[in-house]
Image: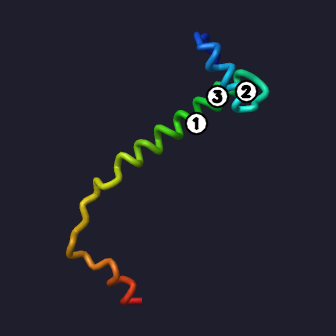
Amino acid sequence: MDTNLTINGTLLEKAFHVGGLQTEDETVNLALEEFIKRRAVEDIISLFNTVEYDEEYDYKKLRREK
C-alpha cells in the first residue's frame, strides 16, 4: 500500500542507523512490526492475575491417574 506520510526526520534517521537497514522503507516497516509486537505483548501482560482459579481443584489428580 503506497501512502504519503509526514515522518519526523530526526526519528527516522536515528531508527535508520540503529536498525542498520538498507532503506528508509525497511526501517519504517520494521518499526511498525516491532510496535505491533510490543502492543500484543502488553495486551497479554495486562491479562496477568485476571484468571480466577478454583481453590478446590486438584491439579495433581490427573498426574496420579496415569
Q: Is residue 39 above or below residue 13?
A: below
Q: Which residue is mark 1?
A: 34
Is label 1 in a helix, a strand or a loop? helix
Q: Residues within 10 Å of mark 1 (few under 14, many from 20)?
A: few
Q: Residues within 10 Å of mark 2 (few under 14, many from 20)?
A: few
Q: Is residue 14 above or below residue 4?
A: below
- Measuring 32% from the left and 77% from the top, which residue is drawn there? 59
Give the quadrant of residue 1: top right
Is label 2 in a helix, a strand or a loop? helix
Considering only order in the chain, which callout, 3 or 2, is on the residue closer to the N terminus?
A: 2
Q: Are marks 2 and 3 in contact (CB under 8 Å)?
A: no
- Please give left or right for residue 35 compared with residue 55 in the image: right
Which of these two is toward me, 21 or 40?
A: 21
* Place of residue 8 in the rendered image (x, y in percent of width and height, measured from the top left): 59, 14
Name which residue type carries label 2: His
Q: Which mark is residue 29?
A: 3
- Please give left or right for residue 22 compared with residue 61 in the image: right
Q: Residues within 10 Å of mark 3 (few under 14, many from 20)?
A: few
- The residue furthest right is 22
Mark 1 → mark 2, Cα distance in angstroms: 16 Å
Name which residue type carries label 1: Glu
Name which residue type carries label 3: Asn
